[in-house]
Image: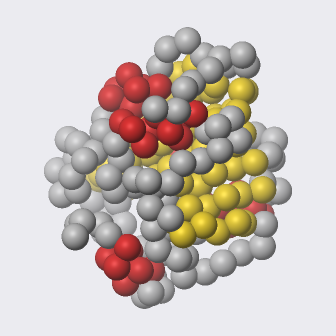
Amino acid sequence: MSEFDKHFWAERYAHPGGHAHGPNAHLVAAASELPPGRALDAGSGHGADARWLAARGWRVTAVDIAAPAVVADGVEWITADLAEWVPDVDGYDLVTSHYVHPMTEELVARLAASVAPGGILLIVGHDPDDRHSAHSSRLTAGQISSTVDGDGWEVLVAEARTVDGPHGHALRDAVFSARKVVGGGWAVP
């Protein structure tokens, strides 16, 4: 059984306030000025990011291994394991994934393939150098960039950022954002 299996997340989501919060600050900064379109929230958790996007007119597909604790209008909720689920190729104007366990290069490649030409890929995770996080299978922003970067992509951000954690101590996030260049391609692995 995986450390972060369906049962782990279902139990976590069953307790309101456990990790329920507003939308991810990196998402708000990256998407506030984008025109609404189709969005994929991969690893949607409690659904705060999906609900925030839907409230701004996005048509959202939210995918998580456990059913969300709260549902919202404007969001298509899919219960699936991201290790196996394959999104539509070129199907989304915005693909966002925050703190997915585990974030693998294969998953990054599948998410990148789902971004429509002109669309944005935003991945935020625990930086492997963050001393407060014991999660395994983390990628640096540079590793994410190496997986995605190449012809067909304009990298907007690829860096470690220090953020205020929920318990008052500083955390390091790996933040990656890129725009798929119109006419650029990416093959599903």
- Using residue 180 as the reference point, say whether residue 19 is left or right of it: left
The answer to which image quadrant residue 175 occupies is top left
The answer to which image quadrant residue 12 occupies is bottom left
How was this image coloured? secondary structure
Picture residue at 44% right of the left edge, 38% below the top = 108
Q: Please tell me whether residue 44 is drawn above or below residue 183 in the rendered image.
A: below
Give residue 62's position: percent from left, percent from top: 61, 61
Taking the view exactly as shown, the residue that stands out farthest to the top is: 151
The answer to which image quadrant residue 18 occupies is bottom left
Q: Please tell me whether residue 59 is drawn above or below residue 116 in the rendered image.
A: below
Q: Please tell me whether residue 59 is drawn above or below residue 130 in the rendered image.
A: below
Q: Is residue 22 visible?
A: no
Give residue 127's position: percent from left, percent from top: 29, 43
Picture residue at 34% right of the left edge, 26% below the top = 142
Quarter the N terminus occupies = bottom left
Q: Is residue 110 visible?
A: yes
- Using residue 21 as the reference point, say whether residue 19 is left or right of it: left
How many marks the image carries: the answer is 0
Picture residue at 55% right of the left edge, 12% below the top = 151
Nearest the viewer among 24 and 84 is 84
Give residue 106's position: percent from left, percent from top: 39, 38
Give residue 111's position: percent from left, percent from top: 53, 41
Picture residue at 61% right of the left edge, 80% below the top = 70
